[in-house]
Amino acid sequence: MKKCILTIVFACIFVSVNAQSYTGARDSKLNVGFEAYGHGSGIKATYDYGIDKLFSVGIGASFFLSNDRDDYFIYARTGVHLGEVLDLPTQLDIYPGVDLGYLSSGNVGINGYLGARYFFTKKIGIFAEIGNSGSIGLSIVL
């Protein structure tokens, strides 16, 4: 049993050593997950594209299952990636950002957030964002 556990631990360490959470210009990530609070709870999907070593831009959509007033939120987003600035392990990135877009009720929606991504492999990781809305899910390198 001890050998099995040690083998799994070393495999995870080996795999995660090669993972990078944000590579800068032309970095391309898809996040898909559950939005727990904010305009409503439901399903969230975002796409982020790196424009340089600190900044990314992207688009996103949230579809709410628990809100009578708003059914969806379609938005543009921007993020500042602090992993390198804070000298974090390459698998981890911390990023504050802003979403600005359109709510189905006809109102303008704006969210500020603080996010984190951690990659277990070169292509697959997890993300969490907290702020005006909160979400957690899977992050995929494209």
Image: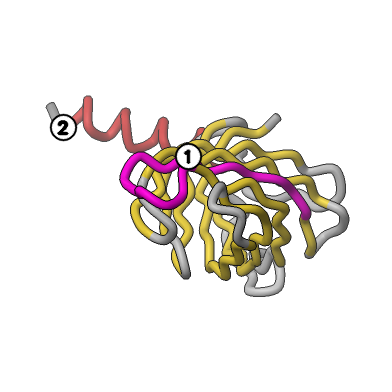
| Front residue of 115 and 131 | 131
The residue tagged 1 is 63
In this rendering, position of residue 102 left or right of residue 16: right
**Res 4 label:** none
Amino acid type for the residue under numbered disc 2:
Lys
Q: Name the image quarter holding residue 55.
A: bottom right
Q: Which residues are magenta?
A: 57-71
The residue tagged 2 is 2
Q: Name the image quarter holding residue 27.
A: top right
Q: Earlier in the sequence, mark 1 or mark 2?
A: 2
> Element at badge 1?
strand
Display coloring: secondary structure
Query: Which quarter shows the N terminus?
Result: top left
Q: Residue at x 78, y 54 (%)?
A: 57
| Front residue of 53 and 1 | 53
Against 64, residue 128 (above or below) is below
Which mark is nearer the camera, 1 or 2? 1
